[in-house]
Amino acid sequence: MPETPVFDHAACAAPHHLAAASGRAVLAEGGNAVEAMLAMAATIAVVYPHMNGIGGDGFWLVREPGGRVHAIEACGPAGRLATIRRYRDKGHERIPDRGADAAVTVAGAVGGWALARDLAAALGGRLPLPVLLGDAIRLAREGVAVSASEARYVPKELDTLYDQPGFAGTFLIGGKAPAAGAVRALPALAATLDQLAHAGLDDFYRGDVGREIAADLDRAGSPVTRADLDAYRAVRRAPLSVRLAQGTVFNCPPPTQGLAALMILGIVERLGRLPPESPAWCHALIEATKRAFRVRDGVVTDFDRLRHDPAAFLTPDRLAREAAAIAMDRAAPYPLRPLGDGDTVWMGAIDGSGLAVSYIQSVYWEFGSGLVLPATGIAWQNRGTSFSLDPKATNPLEPGRKPFHTLNPALAVLDDGRVLSYGSMGGDGQPQFQAQVFTRYAGHRMGVAEAVDAPRLLFGRTWGAESMTVKVEDRFDPSCIAELRRRGHEIEELGGAYVDSLGHAGLLVRHPGNGRVEATHDPRSDGGAAGI
């Protein structure tokens, strides 16, 4: 059974140990959890570029020691040139996966950093940007060993990715994907981060960095303009929440799929107390996911264009109706659209005051659009590929509209006073992995590390696999797998004990009274926990 690191005062967890180390250094210097996360967000953008970067988006949940929870929506809208007509005139039936035409939306992550830094200051944070971004700048300038995760990934549309402007010169070594341990510097990105550290984060949108970004996007042919950058601001939202037997769980509102994550938990609870790893528990998770995704796909869109109140789907009555529609002896069909992919990082931090942060940052597919802007070294996201070119769709492409997001960080406050920060990467798997980690820990009293380490399953498609199957790691009991097949689930055994496509999850738990923090990150990643 894996052991959980326990820290006396504060801790952080990340999918790369250098990001966790950056967070710990900030905590040790007296920074708060939000400041620690800012340092982690910058470092992870350098050391885990296949999963995230400053050319992508981010979402924050921050819980103050007094109990107030903030959500920060840091996702960018489609550029003002991003019209359905533009893509149709180019002969596209859908938005391309890679290249300038995939670089559809403004990158919102740095705008989220700016808003989070304002919140950090309001909560007592005083560390300057050169300190918060210092590790990231140094690692990008001096070089860092390529992670095992990056080395073992085979990105989708590989040839198309490698052909994108600036990609090979930035991320390949000798024209080839680097092996784990090979040292790679990112000097242009280092210079950009250094400029942001001294000129301020706003420079990304309305200063010299923004001017360079806009010029390079224009030359490449992206529909994102200087005016789009200039107009962008991250925004605070009220979080969504659901009340469970153990306490209250929080997540982000649309355009994220946080609604689905909370619905899964609410539905599963109403199906009874089911032993973890049992066929009934697995079946309940799978069927609850189907119900939640049906709602998600018809409801979740740009927050300012919502036609339904997301909270209406989290009421006890609605969750009970969803649970009642599930047959516990057979799998329901799932004829709706295929699910999406996504590569992402989740990170968490809790400080000595009890301030807790759950954060997720992504460029969508591995390396995003593949387009690397030469003046700044920024790899731009392809999150806008989730838009539809059908004007009648739930999420049609239109200028200024924000796309559907798989990103959704989670927080929970249990009735006994424990505070949880948790989440996972993994596209459509994120709500499912969250549910598995939460129910194992809070509902079945597994240890923190044990709940994250335990074998996982995933309903639906994941990167590199188009099948709508239930994917499982090797460590499930064969009798459980046989029973799931008997109930009608199409099971795909992935042939590994710890599989990347089943998420890089993390969990931090602060205990009342002594204030100690248990923290862990996934053995499927290159990370861990650090603290003081």
Image (spheres, helix red, strand yellow):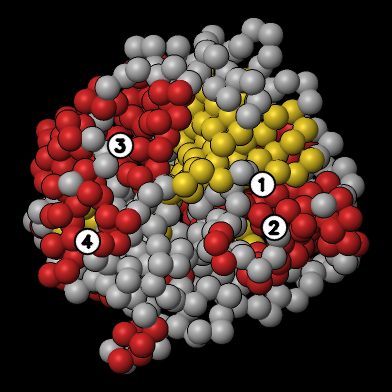
Q: Are marks 3 and 1 in contact (CB under 8 Å)?
A: no
Q: x%, y% of residue 369? A: 29, 65
What is the crowding at mark 4: few (fewer than 14 residues within 10 Å), some, or many (at least 20)? many
Residue 155 percent coordinates (x, y): 33, 63
- Residue 302: x and y in percent read 53, 63
Give the distance between the C-alpha atoms of the residues marked 2 and 4, in whole angstroms: 33 Å
Helix, strand or loop status at disc 1: strand
Q: Residue at x 31, y 48 (%)?
A: 53
| Residue wearing tag 4 | 226
- Disc ID at residue 240: 1
Residues tagged 3 and 2 counted as in contact (Cβ below 8 A): no
Label 3 and label 2: CA atoms lie apart by 32 Å
Give the mark nearest the N terminus, 4 or 1.
Answer: 4
Quadrant for the C terminus in the image = top left
Residue at image point 33% right, 25% down: 22
- 4 vs 1, front mark: 4
N-terminal of the two: label 2 or label 4?
4
Residue type marked 3: Ala
Residue behind mark 3: 42
Marks 3 and 2, the one that precedes in the sequence = 3
Specify whether 303 is left or right of 316: left
Query: Which corner quadrant of the image does residue 99 belong to?
Result: bottom left
* Closer-to-camera residue (288/328): 288
Relative to 286, is 101 above or below?
A: below
The mark nearer the N terminus, 3 or 4, is 3
Circle 4: residue type:
Arg
Residue 310's disc is 2
- Measured Cα–Cα span from mark 3 to mark 4: 23 Å
